[in-house]
Structures are given as structure tokens and as C-alpha cells.
Image (cartoon, rainbow, N blue to C red):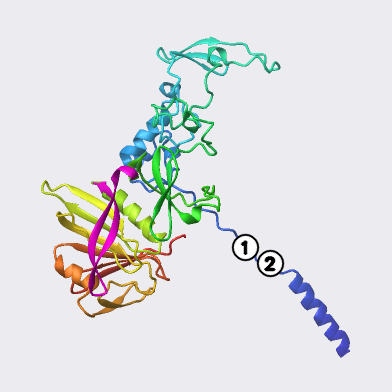
Amino acid sequence: MKRIVLTGFVLLTGITQAQVKKPQVKTKAEKKWVNPVKLTKEERNRPYMDEVLKTRDSITPEEAERRRKNIAIGNPFKDRGYYPKIATLSKGKYLEFHDMDAVVNIGSVKYNRKTKEITEFREIDLSDPDAQPYLDTAGRWFSPDPLSEEFRRWSPYNYAMNNPLRFIDPDGRQATDIYKLDKSGNLTWMAESKTDVIYAEKNFDKNGNLNANNDGGVEVGEKGYIAKNSVSEQVTAEIFGSLKTVTYDYIKFGGNTEKAQNVFDYLSSNSNVEFNRNLFTNSKNDNFSFVGTAHLEDMVPLVKLGANLVESEHSHPDPFTFWPSGFNVNYFKDTGNFTYSKGLPTGDIKAAGNNPATKFILYSPYYKDGALRIRFDSEKIISITNEGKLNR
């Protein structure tokens, strides 16, 4: 009897468990990207603005409206209140519609852009592949180059810089003068193009070719900018208590402080030497910046150029000396708190003491828990900002 009861209990338990539904794991839908530019509700609802907001570029409200108009110009039916989807390669960054004829062909319809009237309906035999409504535009490019406005001096259709025997155009993007950055902070010219871009050496294969899957590098300026604005000077620097002459190489950026910051961050994050970024004002109170290095792992000279030094930022490539020299710092990633103590008045403390009106910043891109930006003066650590781990 006990065996029968036990057998029945086991069967009942098995049936009960078999009827329990397995919990279904719901996959989290990926959030659709929308550009964070600040727009009013009315501006966001304008036709084609949703297409503009797909871009990951950093744009202003004015730039967003300009791009929206570049897309909207391709809609001949806007006066009729009809806004069909318009194909665009650049999401409005460039004007992609260059057919400005009075009468245009849209499928089997002839439409007068000036009078806003349909002038003709054409009968097309769709069974005949040769009977297509291209009309007199058959010899034109069907897909205008979205970069044609950028390089009008080359050609309306900017393919391979008008020289396909020398250059290739694998992706249709803007061509660039390519420089390679090695771990010692040296720049090597690799290829001729139209704007100057620096790529870390990790982006090149063993034959010196730029990998298709690269990190994008950092754009410096127009073609020839690096060659035109690079300076090499012999300067005196204090190294381990003695004065020595070192070579200091730097690139001038004029008043473009944002570009100087971007270049400094990229060079610092992809080399094993110290770089600095210095911001000055001249006698006319105009700002100008430069980014430079002495190609040394443990120091970079503070070159003042006889102008008023407003801000000076330098990098430490060593992840274990992430604090300004002359201080001892303990940083707590989880809370963002830190403690510090002062040591000998040398190095960074000495530089800050000699320039009390200057804003000093230390950038530590290789710190193990995320890139740190530390603001300091000759007396204290003012703030520490953790910018997260970088992709290298």
C-alpha cells in the first residue's frame, strides 16, 4: 500500500512540475538614438527634423534647422501639404539635390517647380525595361555626391579627388591627409588628401595601410594644416634637478580651443609620452592655443611664448603616477572622493606656484579605473573628474 501511495505521489509531483511554465526572458529593446540637441516641441515636429536627429554629430539648433531645409528642398509637393520620405545620404549635412530645372521628371509625371503645376502625364510601358522616364536627364549622375559642396574646386562629383589612378574611394567619405602617430609622439605623413587627420599607429597594418576598421583618428584641419602650423624649438627644461636642452615640437591652433582640446586628448591617449595643451591671450586679448611634446615619458616643458598663460594642461602616460608631481593623491572611484598631501615643491607644484593666475589641469588617460582630469594649483587638488575608460 505504501508503495502504491509513494508511486502516486511521485507521478502527481511530476505532472504538476511539467505544467509550470518556464519564465520567458524578455529582451530589452534597444533605445532608438535621438540627437540631444535642444529644440522646442514645434521645432522637433517640423517635417524631416526626425531624419536630421538621427545624426550623432554634435549640432546646434541652428545647424539642425539648416540640415532640415537641405532635406526639405528635395520635396516638390510641400506646398500641397504632402511630405513623403526623402532619401538622403548625409541626413541633411550636405545639400544633395542639384536638379534645379524648372520642369523636373518625377516618375511618369512632368512637374513645373516654378508654377507648381503638373505639366504632363506620360504613358510608360512598364513591360519594356528600356522605356524608362529618364528623358533628357539620362546622362546625369543619378546619385549626387553629398560632399560636392565641400570640394567644388575639384569637381561636382568628387570621386577619388578626380584622380582614380592614384586614389581609391572605398566608402565615399571625405578624403584626408593621413598622419601616423607613434608611441613616442612622432607624426609621420602617410598619404596625400584634402584634410589633415592623425591616426594612432594601431590603425595601420604592417604595410602601412590604414585599416578599414579604424578608430576614426582626430581631424586637425584643412589640407596642409599640420605642415603649415608645426613648429620645432630647442628649449631649456629642468630634468631631475639639472637644466638640459630638449626639442619641443608643437602644433598651433590659433583661437580654435576646441580643436586643440580634441587633438591633445587623442595624442595623449595613444602615446607613451607627455603632451601639453596651453591656452594664451595676447596683447589684444585674443586667445590662441598649441599642443606639443618633448617626446619624453616623464616631463613636458612649459613653453610660454612671451604671452599671458591662461590655462595649461599636460598628460601623464604612466597609470601609476596619475597625480600632479609634488602631490600624493588617493582617489576612490566608487564615490569620486579623494585625499591628498603635499610633498616637495617641485615639478607641477613648482610650475603652478610660478604661475598663480593660470588654470592647471592634469590628464591621466591610462588610469586603470578610467581617464582622470585633475585640476590643481600650488596648494591643493581642486577637483578630480573620471571620464571613464577609453577605447584603445
Residue 89 versus residue 189 in the image, above or below: above
Quick check: is 135 in the magenta stretch? Answer: no
* x, y percent for residue 142: 54, 24
Horizontal relation, residue 182 to residue 345: left or right: right
**Marks 2 and 1, how far apart at CA:** 9 Å
* x, y percent for residue 149: 39, 29
- Outermost residue to the left: 283
In the rendered structure, which segment of residues is drawn in magenta?
Answer: 227-254
Residue labelled with disc 2: 22
**Label 1 residue SS:** loop
Rendered image: mark on residue 235: none
Horizontal relation, residue 21 to residue 247: left or right: right
Q: Which residue is drawn at 87% across and 88% down?
A: 3
Total marks drawn?
2
- Outermost residue to the bottom: 2
Residue 340 versus residue 128 in the image, above or below: below
Residue labelled with disc 1: 25
Secondary structure that dominates the magenta span: strand
* x, y percent for residue 223: 37, 39
Q: Which residue is drawn at 22% across and 63% down?
A: 236
Please name whichever residue, 275 or 390, is drawn nearer the observer in this view of the structure: 275
Which residue type carries mark 1? Val
Please name whichever residue, 56 or 38, is drawn nearer the observer in this view of the structure: 56
* Res. 39 visible in picture: no
Looking at the rendered image, the disc whose residue lies closer to the viewer, 2 or 1, is 1
* x, y percent for residue 62: 31, 38
